[in-house]
Amino acid sequence: MKKIALAASLALMVGSSAAIAHGDKPGYATHATGGYVITNGSGECWKTPNWTADYVAPECGGEVAAEAAPQYITEDVTKTYALYFDFDSTVVGRVSNIVDYINSQQTLKSVDLVGHADPLGDAGYNFGLSQRRADAVAAKLVEGGVAADKIMTSAMGENAPVANCTGSGAQLIACLRPDRRVDVTVNSSVGKIVYE
């Protein structure tokens, strides 16, 4: 009789140890094959010596983590263009790509136009020329449907050159083309939903 009781006890212990695992629920004894938390006859979860109050399994009274609520955020977007001009000219080339971009923006904040001139000639004249270039670009953008109240113009004259040229005549004029420009900066914002 004692041998049967001993054999039954050993079988129970072996069966119990096979059933106890720690799985993905730290601090709790879990069933080795099902992964569920083992409970006693009163329904209380069996805790291991590694149990801490930092993690309470949902089936043992812990709260299920709520999904993060989506948030609507806006991001500032800046895009720049350069429009180049012939010598002593305010004739604006094609701006349809700029107009299309501006009109595609969710929220247009501003369009900043800064006119420039090359250093050939009188500095005062070049300052006025650079302002006329910025104004000519503004008029073209408004023609394309851009709101006039979003456009700001300014002039730099010959004070912000980018070309480094030597020589004279037609060769110098051609080399200085990058200085005869209007810098276009489109400031807008775009909204999007993020989950954190």
Image (cartoon, helix red, strand yellow):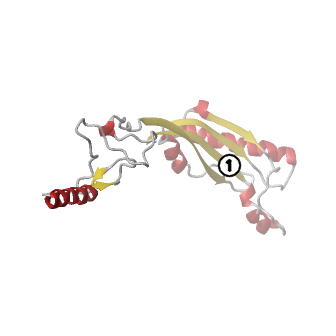
- Graded by Cα atoms within 10 Å as few (under 14), some (14 to 19) or many (20 or more), the crowding at tag 1 reads some
Which x, y percent locates residue 56?
39, 40
Q: Residue furthest front?
A: 1
- Determine the image quadrant of residue 63: top left
Point 72% across, 42% down: residue: 132
Does dot 1 land on a helix, a strand or a loop?
A: strand
Amino acid on which disc 1 is placed: Asp
135 relative to 124 in the view: left or right: left
Q: Residue furthest top?
A: 149
Q: Which residue is denoted by mark 1 in the rendering?
A: 183
Residue 86 or 69: which is nearer the viewer?
Answer: 69
Which x, y percent locates residue 116?
75, 49
Count of numbered labels shown in the rendering? 1
Point 69% across, 38% down: residue: 153
- Determine the image quadrant of residue 1: bottom left
Residue 157 or 188: which is nearer the viewer?
Answer: 188
Point 26% across, 48% down: residue: 36
